[in-house]
Image: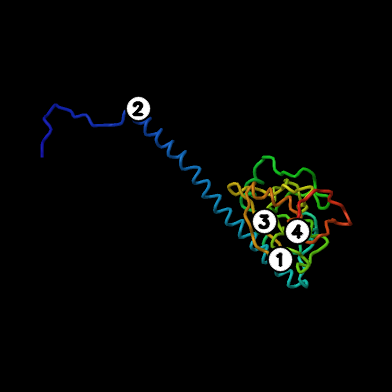
Amino acid sequence: MRRRPPGRFFLTAGFTLVELLVVVAVIAVLVALLMPAMAKAKESARRASCLNNLRQLSLASAAYSNDCKGRYPWFLDWLYTKPGDLTSGRLYPYLKAKAVYLCPTDKIALASKGRMGAIGQSPPFGNSSYPRDYSYAMNCCVCHVTDVAQFLAPVRTLLYMEGNLARNDYSGQVGPVFANSAIAFRHNGSGHLLLADLHIESKNAKTYKALEKSKRFWFPTDDMSGQNGMSFNVQLTAP
């Protein structure tokens, strides 16, 4: 082992300022590249949770139907019977958890201060005096037919939609006039639909656009009247 001669000093190697800045820049670039992938991964996890919520809604609707002679809950009371209290809704006894009503991604948006809702006009029925704590809205066009046996094509008719709803929308409903474009594309550009045969579909803006113009998507039968004989006065393609 060599001994250091007395009186002589050795300089140890170290980072120069330029080299340190280069390392910091490389780390910043790597973080910038990884962040979108991490964000998508987190959103994928929230999407899976949202899908599970809709599956729970489908099971609850099936159980309700079994208990009510094949009928689904009414569009005005599936979410609540006491305004602002979803635990009073017809489906809550089958779900027993408020968290099932709320999409995790929507929950984050509600906690922010950004503008929400794509509805051009408020639903004629329902309530707008309470802060929204749910994410899924029922098709109001099933108002006059809740017996699934009378549905002409339940595989194509909307039951619940993942809605892009205003913060104070406590109607629990969507429809072809006031909320036809209310689906929320919050899951990496796609949103979820629960059809009347209780299967779930994921749609992006392009694939949903064709659905919202279809009569059978909104109306379970050929009767296109609404609550109390209300006319929707909307042009829909057939079928």
Label 2, secondary structure: give it: helix
Q: CA distance from mark 4 to mark 3?
A: 17 Å
Q: Earlier in the sequence, mark 3 or mark 2?
A: 2
* Badge 4: residue crowd in 10 Å (few <14, some 14–19, many ≥20): many
Query: In this figure, which residue is indicated by the disc labeled 4?
Result: 79
186 or 176: nearer the viewer:
176
Q: Earlier in the sequence, mark 1 or mark 2?
A: 2
Asked whether disc 1 touches disc 4, contact meaning CB atoms under 8 Å apart, the reply is no
205 or 102: nearer the viewer:
205
Numbered mark located on residue 193 in the image: 3
* Badge 3: residue crowd in 10 Å (few <14, some 14–19, many ≥20): many
**Side of 229 where 133 appears, left or right:** left
Q: Is residue 24 above or below residue 162?
A: above
53 or 178: nearer the viewer:
178
Q: Position of residue 57 (x, y in %)?
A: 68, 62
Label 4, secondary structure: give it: loop
Q: CA distance from mark 2 to mark 4?
A: 62 Å
Query: In this figure, which residue is indicated by the disc labeled 1?
Result: 61
Label 1 vs label 2, nearer the camera: 1
Query: In this figure, which residue is indicated by the disc labeled 2?
Result: 18
Q: Is residue 233 above or below residue 2?
A: below
* Badge 1: residue crowd in 10 Å (few <14, some 14–19, many ≥20): many
Q: Position of residue 152 (x, y in %)?
A: 76, 64
Q: Earlier in the sequence, mark 1 or mark 3?
A: 1
**Side of 22 where 235 appears, left or right:** right
Q: Earlier in the sequence, mark 1 or mark 4?
A: 1
Q: CA distance from mark 3 to mark 2?
A: 55 Å
Q: CA distance from mark 1 to mark 4?
A: 12 Å
Query: Please, what is the three-letter code of the amino acid marked with disc 4?
Result: Leu
Query: Please, what is the three-letter code of the amino acid marked with disc 2?
Result: Val
Query: Please, what is the three-letter code of the amino acid marked with disc 3?
Result: Leu
